[in-house]
Image: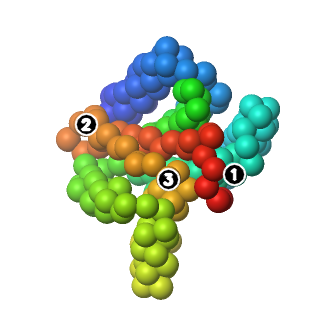
Amino acid sequence: MSAPLNIIADFFDTHFQTEIEQVKSRGELILAYDGVLNPETITKIESEIEQAVESLSIPKSPLKKIFFICVEALQNMLIHGHRDSNGFQYNYFILYREGNVMNIISANLVHKSSIAKLENDIGIINNFPDSSSLKAYYMEHLEKNEISEKGGAGLGFITIGIKSGNRLNTNFTIINDTFSLFHLHSSVNIDAKEKA
């Protein structure tokens, strides 16, 4: 392996381990994954998520939201996560419960040049006062049918925001002159009474 590859791999591993320790000190770790993502891996993780959350006796509405966000976050990392100069993709995923809140963390590699757009996109989503306003924005965005070079219409974050009902929290940690770690934290209130 080349030196840059080791630096990025070590960077992700260190952040993943640190985050696991923090999660365990705050709440109950439900599931964690650090490794290569592909359609087969995602199918396996989705099955593990489904089994794990169904065993927690969570009401149906938040349960559906949690599962939806998990699937969307995993798909976003697979499709939109960047690859390093050697073609490797780095990411991790954590699902944990803290009181009456289920937290979903996804982290993947991004080019530093993408940070401004990601911050802007998440900022727009977080500025909507409620999920019904965000749904209207989603429909408007869908009608414009703006497809990216990776095949998406940029709807993933919007749908996560709608299902979550809470602010999306992001963080970018610089790895080197080219790449950063993109950290997305979404949450679902388990005792939510609103409709799915």
Q: Mark 1 points at which residue?
A: 61
Q: How far apart are marks 3 and 2 (CA)?
A: 29 Å
**Label drawn at residue 174:** 2
Q: How far apart are marks 3 and 1 (CA)?
A: 12 Å
**Label drawn at residue 102:** none
Residue 54 percent location from the top left of the image:
78, 38
Residue 72 percent location from the top left of the image:
58, 55
Residue at x 46% of width, y 75% of height: 136
Q: Residue furthest left?
A: 177
Residue 196 percent location from the top left of the image:
65, 59
**Label drawn at residue 165:** 3
Residue at x 55% of width, y 44% of height: 188
In the rendered image, the quadrant that contains the N terminus is top left
Q: Which of 40 and 73 is in front in this view?
A: 73
For label 2, the crowd category at 10 Å Cα-Cα, with few meaning under 14, some 14 to 19 and many 20 or more, is some
Amino acid type, callout 2: Ile
Amino acid type, callout 3: Gly
